[in-house]
Image (spheres, helix red, strand yellow):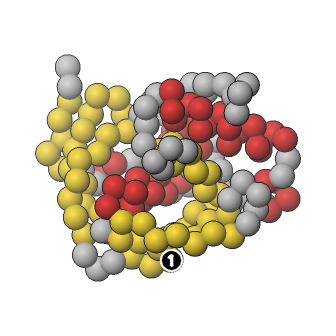
Amino acid sequence: MSNAKILPILINHNPILRKKSTQIRRDEIKTKEFQRLCSDMAKTMEEKDGAGLAAPQIGKNIRLVVVRTENSAVCMINPKIIKKSWAKECGEEGCLSVPDVFGKVKRHKKIICKYLDKKGKEIKIEAEGLMARVIQHEIDHLDGVLFIDKARDIKKLT
Ligand SMILES: [Zn+2]
């Protein structure tokens, strides 16, 4: 993590943000390059003060996201929502790729998400509230969807 670097973030209207990202092969995970990418994305998210960051945002159409938990960054490889609550809730969102824009998005309140961690181990977590929202927002990025596609009451700071 010490020599991780900050990656440039792609901004809205870049076509990479609109492509569907591909699954990551298990044997790719242990490579030095991939491990470095995870560290660089975590560092970039922290430095830019984001709640999460998806690989397309740094120019790679692969199914990798990092999300911020209390004190660390969690890498989620091939994340997939396998269960979601019927109940939804509306909350304000922004995105590092859509600077200075905020809007309200309806998301599932609770989700169960399956992913591989940095060691290739399969993890299943239950998330609710803000964490559930961040995971849904980041997985949308992997499918070429931006929050502004779903948001209402969109505000632009000037
Ligand atoms: Zn975003």
The image shows residue 70 at horizontal and vertical percentages of 45, 48
Q: Which residue is drawn at 80% across and 62% down?
A: 26
Crowding around mark 1 (Cα neighbors within 10 Å: few <14, some 14 to 19, many 20+) is few
Q: Residue at x 45, y 79 (%)?
A: 83
Camera sees residue 134: yes
SS at mark 1? strand
Quarter of image, res 60? top right
Left or right of 107, for residue 29: right
Q: How many labels does the image show?
A: 1
Q: Which residue is drawn at 56% across and 45% down?
A: 73
Quarter the C terminus occupies: top left
Quarter of image, res 24? bottom right
The residue pinned by badge 1 equals 82
* 96 up-or-down from 62: above or below: above
The image shows residue 136 at horizontal and vertical percentages of 42, 59
The image shows residue 8 at horizontal and vertical percentages of 57, 25
Residue lying furthest top in this view? 158
Left or right of 107, for residue 75: right
